[in-house]
Image: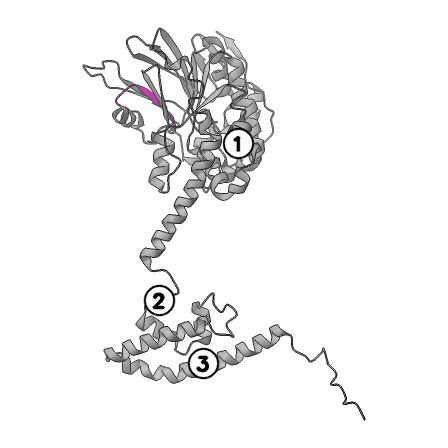
């Protein structure tokens, strides 16, 4: 008995499963094109026939569901996109425009896309979930350092001195402004020092365009630089002062980025805020009075600018600030109804508004500690942005706040008989910040 001959396989001519699928797909597309040509003739008929329009609409919905589950649709059960329907549908695309308006509405009518209200709720739910992650991260890593020590800045007795600097912007801090700030802290030995928001810049995790030179430090380098060159030096200059660190909108950048973009990484102990900046070791207390659960942009602005505040000695509000207008001191004074200080504007200003009940009310807008070149890169011509900081003397018994602005110009600064000028090294730092050489030495102080 002879055995039947086997049919030999020829790998060169045998089609792969994918090739077979594509072949079926091409055949289905040709068949659909033929059906579309046949259906196109109905267009003139349904324009003036309401019943026919409704019938065709229902037929098209059924046809879209057929395409959605078509065995030759590469995304069967997942997608009936405009492209897929154009290729596999029985009706020409112009019918979709006539009877549904857009392909999205076509999908909604077929139940393949959420209704507008449902989509809106789903988006809000997703945002709330994201905000929940942000809040939990902030509560775990940031808010634990808020109000931790309850230092004597809450005690209302005697005369107190408060030194306030804002808008350092990390690596962009001006070396002359920083030297003057540290020298004044060393001379005065204030009871409280407030780093009033935007101590860091974090352009690396910003959705806004970067300043020139913003890429000169990595995220870790900026954190290390800020911790060693600002936080640690401030603590060394005033070892016994209460140091408050206000959460500003730039601090919020990293908090939101870690919790929203990289929640798995945010759980690492090495990425805790207090660990990154040695907050606990340096005896620094964080200031945040808002709610990190902020799904709307308005809520986020409210969090980082208005509700983040502390009240010192029952007399002075410190907050990063909400307004960036020229009249920011007046706006903040009206908002709070008591003496205070804010940053954020990068411009100095004092607004007084005595009343019978409070004859000594004033609000001070502190300048920026960041380099003078920041304003020049954003503003054509002379910039109103100014370098410097504020020093406040408080008579706690009478709730009198005496503000004093210390202005630092590009080549000169003066306070209490002391004069500072930038050294060549400090000028080199400025030039390096914007693309040329230099090192990291600030100016020395002299007397005249």
Which residue has dot 2 on it? 102
Crowding around mark 3 (Cα neighbors within 10 Å: few <14, some 14 to 19, many 20+) is some
Mark 2 and mark 1 lie on one chain; the one further toward the N terminus is 2
In magenta, the rendered stretch is 337-343
Mark 1–mark 3 CB contact (< 8 Å)? no
For the residues marked 2 and 1, what is the alpha-carbon distance in whole angstroms? 47 Å
Frontmost of labels 2 and 1 is: 1
Decide if residue 94 is in sight here: no
Whether residue 177 is situated above or below residue 13 in the rendered picture: above
Residue 17 or 179: which is nearer the viewer? 17
Query: In terms of secondary structure, where does tag 1 sit?
Result: loop
| Location of the N terminus (image quadrant) | bottom right
Which residue has dot 1 on it? 272
Mark 3 and mark 2 lie on one chain; the one further toward the N terminus is 3
Mark 3–mark 2 CB contact (< 8 Å)? no
Query: In terms of secondary structure, where does tag 2 sit?
Result: loop
Give coordinates of residue 77: x percent, y percent: 47, 67
For the residues marked 1 and 3, what is the alpha-carbon distance in whole angstroms? 60 Å
Which residue has dot 3 on it? 33
For the residues marked 3 and 2, what is the alpha-carbon distance in whole angstroms? 20 Å
Q: Residue furthest front?
A: 1
Crowding around mark 1 (Cα neighbors within 10 Å: few <14, some 14 to 19, many 20+) is some
Frontmost of labels 1 and 3 is: 1
Query: In terms of secondary structure, where does tag 3 sit?
Result: helix
Does 168 sit left or right of 40 as displayed? right
Give coordinates of residue 13: x percent, y percent: 69, 80
Q: How is the image coloured?
A: one colour
């Amino acid at each position: 008995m002879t055995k039947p001959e086997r049919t030999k396989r020829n790998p060169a001519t045998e089609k792969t499963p994918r090739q077979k699928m594509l072949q079926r797909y091409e055949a289905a597309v040709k068949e659909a094109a033929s059906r579309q040509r046949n259906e196109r003739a109905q267009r003139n008929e349904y324009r003036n026939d309401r019943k026919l329009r409704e019938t065709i609409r229902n037929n098209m919905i059924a046809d879209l569901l057929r395409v959605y589950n078509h065995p030759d649709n590469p995304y069967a059960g997942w997608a009936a996109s405009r492209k897929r329907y154009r290729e596999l549908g029985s009706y020409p695309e112009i019918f979709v425009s006539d009877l549904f308006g857009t392909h999205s509405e076509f999908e909604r009518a077929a139940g393949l896309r959420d209704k507008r209200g449902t989509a809106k709720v789903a988006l809000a739910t997703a945002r709330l979930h994201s905000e929940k992650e942000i809040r939990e991260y902030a509560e775990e890593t940031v808010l634990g350092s808020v109000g931790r020590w309850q230092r004597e800045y809450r005690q209302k007795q005697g005369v107190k001195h408060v030194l306030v600097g804002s808008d350092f912007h990390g690596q962009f801090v001006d070396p002359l402004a920083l030297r003057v700030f540290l020298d004044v802290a060393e001379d005065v030995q204030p009871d409280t020092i407030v780093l009033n928001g935007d101590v860091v810049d974090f352009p690396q995790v910003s959705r806004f365009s970067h300043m020139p030179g913003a890429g000169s430090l990595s995220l870790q380098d900026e954190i290390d630089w800020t911790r060693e060159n600002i936080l640690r030096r401030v603590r060394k200059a005033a070892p016994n002062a209460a140091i408050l660190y206000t959460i500003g909108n730039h601090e919020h950048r990293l908090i939101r980025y870690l919790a929203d973009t990289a929640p798995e990484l945010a759980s690492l102990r090495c990425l805790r805020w207090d660990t990154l900046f040695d907050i606990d070791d340096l005896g620094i207390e964080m200031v945040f009075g808002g709610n990190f659960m902020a799904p709307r942009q308005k809520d986020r602005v409210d969090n980082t600018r208005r509700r983040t505040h502390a009240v010192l000695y029952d007399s002075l509000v410190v907050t990063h600030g909400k307004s960036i207008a020229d009249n920011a001191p007046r706006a903040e004074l009206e908002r709070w109804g008591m003496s205070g200080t804010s940053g954020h504007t990068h411009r100095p200003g004092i607004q007084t508004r005595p009343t019978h009940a409070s004859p000594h009310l004033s609000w001070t807008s502190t300048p920026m500690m960041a380099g003078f070149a920041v304003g020049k890169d954003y503003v054509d011509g002379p910039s109103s942005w100014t370098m410097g900081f504020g020093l406040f003397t408080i008579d706690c018994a009478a709730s009198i706040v005496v503000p004093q602005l210390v202005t630092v110009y590009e080549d000169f600064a003066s306070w209490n008989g002391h004069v500072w000028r930038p050294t060549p090294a400090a000028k080199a730092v400025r030039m390096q910040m914007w693309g040329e050489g230099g090192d990291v030495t600030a100016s020395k102080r002299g007397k005249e």
